Image: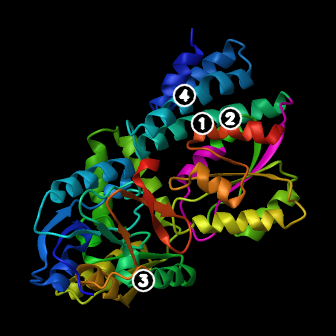
Amino acid sequence: MSTFADLSKAVESGKRKDAKQIVEDLLAEGTAPLDIVEQGLVPGMSAIGEKFKKNEVFVPEMLIAARAMKECMGILEPLLADAGVKPEFTAVIGTVQGDLHDIGKNLVAMMLKGANFGVVDLGTNVSPDQFVAAAREHNAQLVCLSALLTTTMPAMKTTVEAIRGSDVSAVRVMVGGAPVTQAYCEEIGADGYSQDAASAVDLALELAKS
Amino acid sequence: MDAPPAALIACEVFRDEIDMLAGKARHLRVTRFLEIGLHDQPDRMRVTLQQAIDAMDGRDDIAAIILAYGLCGLGTAGLQAGRHPLVIPRAHDCITVFLGSKESYAERQRACPGCYHYTPGWNRARRVPGPDRLAMMREELSKQFEAEDVDFLIESEEATWATYDTATFIDLGTPNAGREADYTRRCAESMGWRFEHLKGDPALLRDLLHGPWDDERFQTIRPGELLGHSPDEAVMRADPASEK
């Protein structure tokens, strides 16, 4: 019998075929799709994320783990929709203007989907106005800003300013990316900072509910 | 003010440019190059650089330690001065140094966000987008991952390049510039990118090596201080070491 722990391990080690097989087995055993996501996939990604943070693994390991999770989500998403599991919150996410890096942003987007967020991914090099427009259009509770470069961090500040000066000023803004810190988050008036994709989910839930 | 007797710790990426600009400068008593790409792991970079600084700090024939680095993904944030002050350009990364000022870099980023910058050091390390980079990645990844995963990781790397459209060679007039420009052009061709040959500005690197170290362009970290990130135009600042 397959277990959530087996699934987590398969995701963590990037064994996508094993992971998909375990998902199929769990479904055949009558396990609820949402439980598979929350208790199998997300903990697996959290575990590899923890190792990444400690420099025990690097970007390639993160990428193959993310691929395993993504492919499992491909099986589960239609079932979640069929089961009437609707996203409770909507998050707009993107890499800020001038920055073309998206690995971290993609990981957070996927983890948010795993936590049953509706995710509107605007991609990279996203202007402040695009963030504001998307938050308005999708009635988002959360806007997530990513930056990999110290050169593009100031674009986080201008984006926060644009949001605060708009008709969606109440939307919660969270920031992240390698050079970003809690101090910077506070300095630019964002609502929250997280150091990695796993804690980004906890923060997102906290902010969306607040 | 010209530079006092100093030790130089430099990223390997600057080797050709430093060889050209430092010449036989007598005030540079010792030079140590560290491997390129340390910024991939900022925590490791910080430890490696601090060890290099500490190893120089006992010398009595120097009055400063010059760091040919930028902020480099915060890899230099937290570096502490010992007995001798540290001097570092107010640069986000080496591209600022190759272009001569952080203002030039900012302007370049505005004008051409799809430009990927090539220099002799980057080219030599095979860290620039192109066929050699892919071959090297494939060889490295194959030691650890299954063939199917290697293919996926290579495709992922290529996907990150898809957001660029121009290979820009920054020419500081090093003797090998012609050859390295040709290499850059070949990389551009292999990826279907535009090739651009851009004249760099050696002023920032030259002044880092020889002085003067004005506060506008250089950050000095004095004994009892550490290098902090300043998320504004200044790029860097000196924080009291006790705040670490």
Picture residue at 46% right of the left edge, 67% below the top:
B236
The residue closer to the viewer here, B154 or A160, is A160
**Residue B11, position as x, y percentages in the image:** 25, 66
* Disc 1 to disc 2: CB gap under 8 Å: yes
Tell me if residue B167 comes above or below residue A160 in the rendering: below
Q: Which residues are magenta?
A: A84-109
Q: Position of residue A112 (x, y in %)?
A: 69, 40
On residue A125, the disc is none
Between B115 and B63, the one lying in front of the other is B63
| Mark nearer the viewer, 3 or 1 | 3
SS at mark 4? helix
Q: Do marks 4 and 3 both belong to one polypeptide chain?
A: no
User: What is the quadrant of the N terminus of chain B in the image?
Assistant: bottom left
Circle 2 residue: A202
Label 1: element kind: helix
Which mark is nearer the camera, 4 or 2?
2
Q: Nearer the viewer, mark 3 or mark 2?
A: 3
The residue labelled by disc 3 is B101
